[in-house]
Every structure is written in structure tokens, then in C-alpha cells.
Amino acid sequence: MTWLLALVVLAVISWLAFPHVAKVLIRARLKGYWRDANTVDPSAPERLSSPRTVAVVGAGLAGLTAAVTLARKGFTVTVIESNTYLGGKLGSWPVELAPGRTVWASHGFHAFFPNYVNLNRFLDSLGLRRSFTSIGEYVIVGEHDEVRFDDLDNTPALNLLSLAKAGVFPLSDAFKAPGRDLYGLFLEYRHDQTVADFDHVSFAQFDALARTPPKLKLAFNTFARAFFADEDKLSMGELLKSFHFYYLGQDGGLVYDYPTQDYESAFLAPIRAELARHGATIRLSTRVQSLSKTSDGFVLDGERFDQVVMAADVVGARAILGQAQGLPAELTRRFDRLRPGQRYAVLRLWCDKDVRADIPPFVITDRIDVLDAVTAFHRYEVETRADLANHPGFVLELHCYAVPEKLNEREVRDALVAELQVLFPETKGLTISHEVFQLKRDFTAFHVGMYAERPTVETGVPGLVCAGDWVKLPFPAMLMECAAASGLWAANALCREVGVREEPVRSVTLEGALVGTPTPPGRAKLLAMLGKPT
Ligand SMILES: Cc1cc2nc3c(=O)[nH]c(=O)nc-3n(C[C@H](O)[C@H](O)[C@H](O)COP(=O)(O)OP(=O)(O)OC[C@H]3O[C@@H](n4cnc5c(N)ncnc54)[C@H](O)[C@@H]3O)c2cc1C
């Protein structure tokens, strides 16, 4: 009997016989799941005593978290944003569908997971999660099949066993090569060593080696696509980090919350008011073009600031810092190598057919070519429901998180509508009265080989820090939580420079439940097949 078999048998028995004891032991093994990522000095002053000007470039979640945190501490904050609206990928803007009929459009539905501890704390500080509701269950809809992740145990490791119990994979696979030798890696996450070790491997390469059972593969594929990359591009290191962060490092579970209001009402208006209350200036429709370092600060397009938070997306950060004057050459080179990932598409339709009623308002789909998720806005969003009261119909939003390069804009749009009708036959022959279509390439690439080069919050240049979902943090966090946590981390770094008290930052435990256990004998041979970076 191998050590793995012994562990699994022990876990199954203890889970079945003494579930509470198993949970307590796992929680203890993972050090209570959460840790303080920084040390706050309670004797440091809460507010700045002498004026300090800070430019926050980019008003996405990262920039807004940094801006609000710094403005509350007395910094003189100027937020500079190229869009006509705040929020970046969480932004929201008015669209006139017909004379006298204006609705709010956005980049699409967002899931707020319980493990987004820093983001949740930020939103709670503004009372913004009161209008959130729970999705209820996590569902993946395929052409012939559907997977529902309800009644899963949330405890790490036990949640894997409950996936087996739900029929997502046969438990016997845990005892057979190659799964036996490879899947333990998911529970052996070690920040950031694991990401570095597996950054040269794509998820597709790993998956081919592990011969993942079909339903588990479906779950992995859709999870992987949530990082806006196809399987052959997505770094296995980033995926292992994501699994640790979302599933195997804490017990929040897969069921998430979402706002029942449009993003403008749900977040952006209250954040704008908070910034105004603390004297911050917001400049919209202003694209920062240049940055130079001077002896005592920075000049952005001719205007001087003491400190800068670079919270633009990868495209913007590269354009500004890749060409910046007066910074170390290695730093500008690193920014110049930043790249966005594949294109993504969001298509919002006002139409005369609905998807079936037995699914939650947001479902992930097992794409045929393009369709990765469907949202039924008319089921929950207050503003959409008010509009539809006067204009009967339905509002569906279709997402593609990694658009195939071969498709042009029209083909992507048409493929989304066609796939909707295949995966949800009840929408066949739908009539579309209005639509808003976005096809963009400004998302962070979590592609093979990019991790080592990813910039960190601290640039090594006093006064210049970075924030965004593309920034490498000293703990695991992804997407919106990475944006918010890096915004806080950036604000803290600037506070430290002037002796102002930091805000607490929390992070999931840095190591998985099986770190330190013996390596299965077959693993080294299998991993050798994946090669090493040159
Ligand atoms: C369709 C879709 C669905 C998503 N779903 C989820 C989800 O369910 N859960 C989740 O956690 N995450 C999700 N995400 C990801 C999430 O939206 C992002 O991770 C997060 O919002 C990124 O925030 P950010 O501040 O890092 O970047 P951004 O939101 O991109 O903000 C950067 C800002 O910088 C501005 N900018 C760029 N260049 C300049 C310049 N030169 N001058 C001034 N301003 C500039 C941009 O206009 C933008 O406003 C989703 C994203 C999309 C697109």
C-alpha cells in the first residue's frame, strides 16, 4: 500500500466516521487557512502629517482600492483614467438603446468569491456588500451533459473526495498511475516555488500526461478558461496557484456572491463619493502618456507628483513604464515585455427568449468554439428589471474568455449567438432587438513562461509602486482579489515610505495540505517528460 493510498483511505474513513475531527485536523494542518500578510505597527500615525501628492494611474479595482486607502490617510490623491467611466473591467456606462431608453452596460457578470478577503473587507468598509446575493450553486452546462457542484464539502482535500462522491471522477483514479503520481501536486502547493517550477508547462501538456477523467477535465477546462487563456497557453504554475487559492487552501467553497444592482449603483457611485469626501480628484477621459523620474518625484505628462501608483492594465502599464525616463533599464525592460492575453468578448442581448429556469442566473458553459458563460440579467438586476417593465423581453449576456485568433469580430459575435441556441435549445430562433458587443485585448496573460518576469508591487524605485491583477504578490491571489490586494499592498508601501500606519492585508495559507509528504515514486519520471525550461 503506497503512502498516498494510506492517506486517502485514512481520509475517507475519518471523513465518513468522524467528519468533524477530519475537518479540525485539516484546518489545523493548514494553519487555520488564513494568515496576516503584513505586520501593522499600531504606534504609527493613522494619517499623513505633511502634504504628499500621489497620482493613481488607472481607475480599475486596483487603482480605486489604492486611491481610497491613500485618500483616507490624508494623501492628496489624483486618479487619472483613460475611460469615460470608473471601474476598469468592473466599469459601467450608459448606452442609449432607443430615444428615451438608456440602460447601463458593463464588461460583464463578476463572481465575488468568499475567499476574496481583502476585496470583501474593502467593500465592507463602504457598506457595499449589502446588496449582494448568493448564486446558490455552481453549474457547468455542456451540450450533452451538465455538472452541478452542490452539496460539496468545503474543507480542503475533503472537497476533492466529495467531487468523487458527486461522480466528477472515480475515486479509484487516485490509486492508479498517472493520476496517483500527478494529482497530489494540487495539494502540495508552495508559494511561489510551485508557480516557478511549473511555469514552463501548459495546462494542456499536464492534462495529456495525467489523462484526466472526462468530467474532471470539463471542470478543469472551464476553471482554466476563467483565467482568459486556452489550455495550451495557460501556465500550469498559475493554475496550481489558482486551485490552492480558490479550492484547496481554504474552506470558502465554490458558491459565490454577486451584486443585484448595476455596477454603477453597486460600487462606483459610492466609491466616487468616498474619494470626493476625502478630497481626491478624479480625471476621466485622460490617458497618461509619459512618466519621468526626477530627483524628488515624478512627472506625468508635465505634471509633478511625489508618488505614483501604476494601476493601468498590462497594455497601459507597458506603454507608460516601458518607455519611462529616469528608471533603471532593467525595470523598463521588464515592463516592455508585459503582454496582454487572448481577446475576450462580451455580448449583451435584448431578446425574446429566455434560458431554462432551473439554472442559476450565471452559468459556465462547456464551450463548443466560443461560448464560456451565460448570464440572465433579467432574473436579478434591479435596473434591468425596471427597464424591462416598460419593454418586455429578456437580457442575456454571453462571454467568451479566450477568443480563437482565427475569428474576426463578426464571426465571434455570430458564433456566440449560434452556440447559445445549441447549448440552450429553448432559445432557438430568438429575435434580438438590441445588443452591445465588446471584443477586447487588454487582459493579463497568465501564459507559459511569464511568471519570472511579472512585475511586483514594489519596483525598487522609491515612490513608484504597481497594482493590478497582473502584479506578482508575495501570496496567492487571483483576478479581482489580486487587483484589490495589490492596491492595498501598493498603498501600504507608500505609507511605509512616510511612516504612516499600514492597512492589514490577509492571505490564504502559503502551503497546501500535503506539503512535506513523500513524493510518489512515479512522479519524477512523468515530470521529466514535461521537460525543464532552458
Ligand atoms: C468579462 C469578464 C469577466 C470577469 N469575471 C470575473 C469574475 O467573475 N471574478 C473575478 O474575480 N474576476 C473577473 N474578471 C477579472 C476582473 O475584472 C479583473 O481581474 C479586475 O477587474 C482587474 O482590475 P484592475 O484594476 O487590475 O484592472 P482594470 O480593471 O483593467 O483597470 C485598469 C484601468 O487602467 C486604465 N488605463 C489603462 N491605460 C491607461 C492610461 N495610459 N492612462 C490612464 N488609465 C489607463 C484602464 O482604462 C482601466 O480602467 C472578469 C473580467 C472580464 C473582462
Image (cartoon, rainbow, N blue to C red):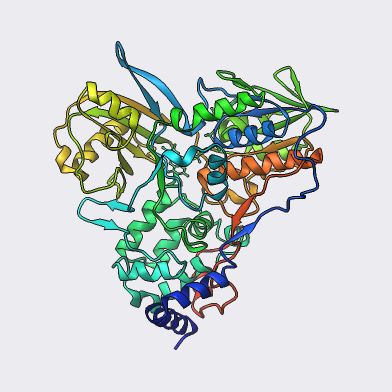
> Which residue does the image show at 73% across and 42% down from the upper left?
493
The C terminus appears in which quarter of the rendering? Answer: bottom right
Q: Residue 272 occupies which quadrant of the picture?
A: top right
Q: Position of residue 318 (x, y in %)?
A: 62, 33
Q: Identify the residue at the far bottom of this view.
A: 1
Can you tell which quarter of the image residue 203 is in?
Answer: bottom left
In the image, 121: left or right of 306?
left
Asked if one can make out residue 401 in the rendered structure from this viewpoint, the answer is: yes
* Count of numbered labels shown in the rendering: 0
Is 421 in front, or is 342? 421
Above-or-below relation of 219 to 263: below
Residue sitting at the far right: 295
Residue visible at 55% across and 30% down in the picture: 271
Rendering quarter of residue 501: top right
Residue 322 visible here = no
In-front residue for pair 77/416 = 77
In percent of the image, x 56 and y 19: which residue is there? 284
Give the image location of residue 523, x and y in percent.
Answer: 50, 74
Relative image position of residue 404 (x, y in whole percent): 37, 40
Query: Nearest the camera: 340 or 88?
Result: 88
Decide: is 300 above or below 424: above
Q: Position of residue 459 (x, y in %)?
A: 73, 41
The reply, left or right, for residue 378 in relation to residue 518 is: left
